Structure formats: structure tokens, C-alpha cells
Amino acid sequence: MIAAVVQRVATAGRVDVELLVDGVAVEVSAAALEVGDGTVCAGEWGPWLPGFVREALQSLEDQRRLGIHHTPSHVIEELLDLLEQRTGPIDAHSSVLDPAVGGGAFLLAVAERMSGDRREIAERFWAVDIDPIALATAHAALSLWAGGPVSTGRFVLGDFLAVSTSERLPDRVDLVVGNPPFLSQLKGPTARNADARAALRTRWPDVGGYVDDAGAFLLGGAERLSAQGAMVLMQPDSILAASDAAPVRARLQNVAPIRGLWVEEVRSFAAAIDTVAIVAAPGDPGPVQVGRVDAPEPSPGSWGHLLAAARGVPVIAAMSEGPSLAAIAHVTAGFRDQYYGLVDAVVDDADGEHPLITVGLIDPLRNRWGAVPARFAKQRFQHPSVDLDRVEPSVVDWIRARLVPKVLVASQTKVIEAIVDEVGCAVPSVPVVSVEPRPEAPSLWHVAALLTSPVATTLAVLDAAGTAMSADAIRVSAARLARLPLPPDRGAWDEAAAAARRGDIDECGWAMLRAHGLSHRCDVFEFWRSRCPS
Ligand SMILES: C[S@@+](CC[C@H](N)C(=O)[O-])C[C@H]1O[C@@H](n2cnc3c(N)ncnc32)[C@H](O)[C@@H]1O
């Protein structure tokens, strides 16, 4: 059997293979290798051998076109562990489907977790692949495992997403496992043809024909699960936060909500994509296990916070119901026009009326203007000051409108860093964000405290996760700051404001946690404090 597979893959790949049995080279032919017990031929790799052979013989071009990246066995074990933690031990009587079976590694790993008659177990396994060699490989692998040929009827050759393939599969299975191809539909050789796109659009009209194949496999798998069923499928991490994938996330939550998320720590695949795996099962949605933490149930908008949680960011619920910073402050930032409008207006003047505040001059609750030099428009200034008469006329009104008491916030920092301009004379450089309290605001210092808070930083990191999850810097956009929630406990917020006025960052941070009803969340404080500049 092994010989047959090796021969087929070798012929398809137009390569010469040398096979050694007990150190002696033998001819690659069924006759030469039909030596009784298959495990003898398979050696220490056992039933996994055919899959390794197939993978080794793939051309790079085929790997790209078909999305072939075999899954390392330690990864499969981690995924099945997570599946069992979330949905209970794998039942030896389960029917199992791998919709993109490749060499059969997932089915083998599931089989290894079942006890009972191996033939009977293997006869409940279903496999689909678009590549006949893959299917032959998986069949050989499972037959080796079962100790004899398993019937071929449940090894279905075809495109899992095509109706003609669907019709040859059972309506319901208990387990769906696998690593479907990640094929971007935006361009290139992996894009579907018009017919295939139209077929997908008929099946899932809101998802559209341009969804990445992996997302379509997720839906196809979920819709085939029995009521007690469960699924674990690998996915590109874009499934978590890309807006294109929002309809996939919404549908999945209706059919088989996400229960667990596995995130690749070390890139194990040749594909230049960060990989995750989703455990899903029918029933009511609930918390999602990510590593050792339980993250709250996600909304379809983005599951990026799950990714952040996997990377050690403490998870706090979005708190989106109550009023936000936008209710008590106008939040704005200059852009290209404001930057160029200031270029000829900045001078070095220790007595300047309008200090220019660049990102580099802002530390949490500490304005370093004059204490350290600043760079603006490729020049260095010890006391950068704006001469209003020299500001480009088209932006002078915008600059003058900033001359009010305000809080200025740096961008691309590890925590939200804010300073207070009580007098209202400072000019924000670009991209400094200006937060200008409305009459409804309790005080400038309350606004500064709200920003100098473990809660604000953690929410901003969670909010940004999945879009630009550079491990460190937070892109502090005006829109993101405007969404920050106001704390419900006014007494604690007053204390935080007083601490901010004293420049006491720690006390401000603890009081803000109390103000948000999160005084027990030392992890949130520690996360924030460890990122603050020393
Ligand atoms: C990433 S590999 C995974 C292989 C296997 N699950 C493993 O981990 O070893 C993806 C497999 O999907 C197959 N494939 C690609 N497009 C497919 C489609 N539309 N339907 C079914 N299988 C497909 C490829 O031939 C390849 O074997």
C-alpha cells in the first residue's frame, strides 16, 4: 500500500525516490514492498508516513495554488486538547469529517484518541480533498492505522464548497476537524472562477463570493454539525478582525458559536500568514477560552480582542453601553494640512507664547517642553514655539481653535500618555490628539485621569488588536479616544483627578480602576504599569 502511494506521488511529482528498508535500497514498486504488515513498511512514522511523502513531493506552485501546508502533529494535538477541554472528550463512536484532508494527519490524530475496534472507528471517518493524490494518501494512512484497507466510499474527491461534493457527504457529523486551504479571493491564481463565486453567493448571500476559502470551510463545516457536535478548524488570523469576514463571524455565532481560540505562538507553516484555530459547537454563545483565560463572548464586529487576549493583554468587557469621552469633550487631531501649515511657523523661543507640543514631549502627566529637545519638520528645537503670524492662512483658524484649556495625548506609545494644558496656550503638533472638555466635563483633570488609566490603555489595545497588532505601540486616533467609556463611580473618579493633578500616576491608575468598578483587576493595573515609561 505504501509502495503504491509512494509510486503515485513520485510519478506525479516526476521525481526519483529511493526507498530504504532496513538500510537496504529497494525498488519502489508494489510488488517489492507488499511485505505483509503495513507498519513494517511505514517504519517509525507509522501511518503518518504517506502524508510526509506526499508533502515532500509537492511543487511550490502546487502548494500555493491548493493551499497545501501540512499541519505539524504537535499543533494538531494542541487543537484537539482545546476541543476536548471545551466540548468534552472525543467519543469513540463519533462520525468525523475532514473537509480538506491532505495526508490525513487530523483524522489519524482523532483516531488515536479513540479506543475500540480500529476498523469500526475508521469506517465512521469521512474525508474530502480536491487532489486525488491527497485522498489516496489519506486513505492509505487510515488503512495503515486500522490494520487493513478501509472502504473508499467515504473518501470523497471534490471541492468541499461545491454542491456536488456536499451531496455525497452525510447531512450531519459529530466532529469536523482540519486545516482547510487559506486561499485569498482578492487576486491571483488562488481566486475562484465566476461560477464558483456565484455558487457561494447563492449559499451565503451576505458573505459574498470573495470570502477567503478558509472562512467558507468554517461555515460549511458548522452547518454540517450534529446538535452535540463540535468542530476545530485552522484559519488565517484575518478571520478574527477583517471587516470582510464579519458576515462569516455572525453566521458562525448563529450556527455553532466559537468556544475556544488557539493562536500560533511560533509560526509553524511555510505560509506567510499568522494562523489561529477556532473551536466551535452548536448551542448558546458564551465565553471563549483563549490559552488559560476565558474571554467574554465576542460580537461579530471584531474578534480582535481574542487575539489580544492570546498575546497576554488582560481582557475587560467593552463597556460600550454608557456615555463615552465624546459626551464631555471634543476630541480632534491635525493631519497633513495642519502639519505643513506649521512648518514655517515654528521657532526656537524659550519665552514663546505658544509652545508646540510634539509626541516626544508628552509623558504620562508630565510635559517635558523645554526640558528635552524636540524634533519637528526634520529640525531640532529646545523650545519649539509657534509664531501664529507665520502659520499658513488655510489652517490658522484650526490652530487658533486649539488655544483652549485641554488635554494633549501622544500617539504610537505603549500606554495612553496625556498632559494637561491648563492655560490653553499650547499648540498640538501632528499627530498629537487634542481633547478639549465641554462644559459638561467635571474638570480638565478628570479628563486627564480618564486617559491616564489602566482601563483606557487596555481598552485601546483590545480595540486596536487585529488591525495593527504591533506588540507595542497603540495608535491613539481621535476616534478611538472618543469611544472610551466614562467611569460610573464619580467619587473614585474625583480621587483619580486629584491624583492626576498631583502627578501621582499610580494613585491615579488605582482610583480609575475603582471608578470603573474594576478594583479587583490587579492584572489590568500591572499590564498598564509595566508598559508606562519609567
Ligand atoms: C492546508 S492543506 C491541509 C492538509 C491536512 N489537513 C493537514 O493538516 O495535513 C489543505 C488541503 O486542502 C486541499 N484543498 C484545496 N482546495 C480544496 C477544496 N476546495 N476542497 C477540498 N480540499 C481542498 C488541498 O489539496 C490540501 O490537501
Image: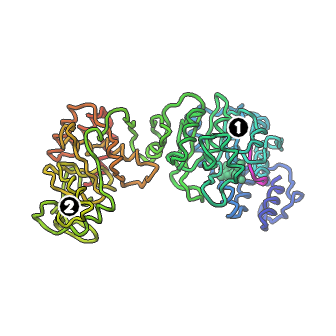
- From the Cβ of disc 2, is ligand 1 less than 8 Å away? no
Q: How many marks?
A: 2
Q: Which mark is residue 356?
A: 2
Q: Which residues are magenta?
A: 127-133
Give the mark toward the camera: 1 or 2. 2
- From the Cβ of disc 1, is ligand 1 less than 8 Å away? no
At mark 1, the secondary structure is strand
> What residue is disc 1 on?
96
Tag 1: amino acid: Val
Rendered residue at 37%/54% (across/down): 472
Nearer to the camera, 133 or 468: 468
Badge 2 crowding class, 10 Å Cα cut-off, few under 14, some 14 to 19, many 20 or more, is many
Q: Is residue 217 above or below residue 336?
A: above
**In the displayed image of the protein, which residue is found farthest to the right?**
31
The spot of residue 408 in percent (x, y) is: 23, 52
Nearer to the camera, 191 or 318: 191
Res. 475 in view:
yes
Q: Report the side of 257 relative to 332 (left or right).
A: right
At mark 2, the secondary structure is strand
Q: Which mark is residue 116?
A: none
Q: Report the side of 31 relative to 267 (left or right).
A: right
Rendered residue at 15%/44% (across/down): 501
Q: Report the side of 487 relative to 133 (left or right).
A: left
Nearer to the camera, 434 or 359: 434
- The quadrant where residue 413 appears: bottom left
